[in-house]
């Protein structure tokens, strides 16, 4: 085979390193949309009950997504030395 460097070696940083940050930003956007739906009184033509239910769903989804993303990508993983 040819002795060529891999794509990651040539590019330096892998684009996959940005994915966890994108997921966190998306979760904050979902939470912001939920708060916006709760506070937007005359801006959206939806009944008050529907707006609040939809806002609550977006807010809860954003919180759940943020917690899962943080736990999966940003928590320090225990090593063998931590157990001793």
Image (cartoon, grey):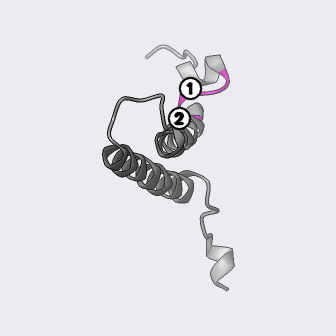
**Left or right of 45 in this view: 32:** right
Residue beneath disc 2: 19
Q: Nearer the viewer, residue 69 or 17?
A: 69
Q: For the view shown, which residue lies furthest in the bottom direction?
A: 84
Q: Do the residues labelled 2 and 1 touch (CB within 8 Å)?
A: yes
Q: Nearer the viewer, residue 54 or 27?
A: 54
The numbered mark at residue 55 is none
Residue 54 lies in what quarter of the image?
top left
Element type at mark 2 = helix
Residue 75 lies in what quarter of the image?
bottom right
Rendered view: 73 above or below 17: below
Q: Nearer the viewer, residue 27 or 16?
A: 27
Residue beneath disc 1: 15
Figure label count? 2
Element type at mark 1 = helix
Visible in this render: residue 34? yes
Rendered view: 25 above or below 82: above
In magenta stretch: residue 1: no
Q: Residue at x 53, y 45 (%)?
A: 35
Q: Which residue is drawn at 62% across and 74% down?
A: 80
Alpha-carbon distance for marks 2 and 1? 7 Å
Q: Give the range drawn in magenta.
A: 12-17
Residue 25 pos. (x, y %): 57, 37
Q: Which residue is drawn at 56% across and 26% down?
A: 15
Q: Quadrant of the N terminus?
A: top left
Residue 18 pos. (x, y %): 59, 32
Residue 29 pos. (x, y %): 53, 37
Residue 45 pos. (x, y %): 36, 29
């Amino acid at each position: 085979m040819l002795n060529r460097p891999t794509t990651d070696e040539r590019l330096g940083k892998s684009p996959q390193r940005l994915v966890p940050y994108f997921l966190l930003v998306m979760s904050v956007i979902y939470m912001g949309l939920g708060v916006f739906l709760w506070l937007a009184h005359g801006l959206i033509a939806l009944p008050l009950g529907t707006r609040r239910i939809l806002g609550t769903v977006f807010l809860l989804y954003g919180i759940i997504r943020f917690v899962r993303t943080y736990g999966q990508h940003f928590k320090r993983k225990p090593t063998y030395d931590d157990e001793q």
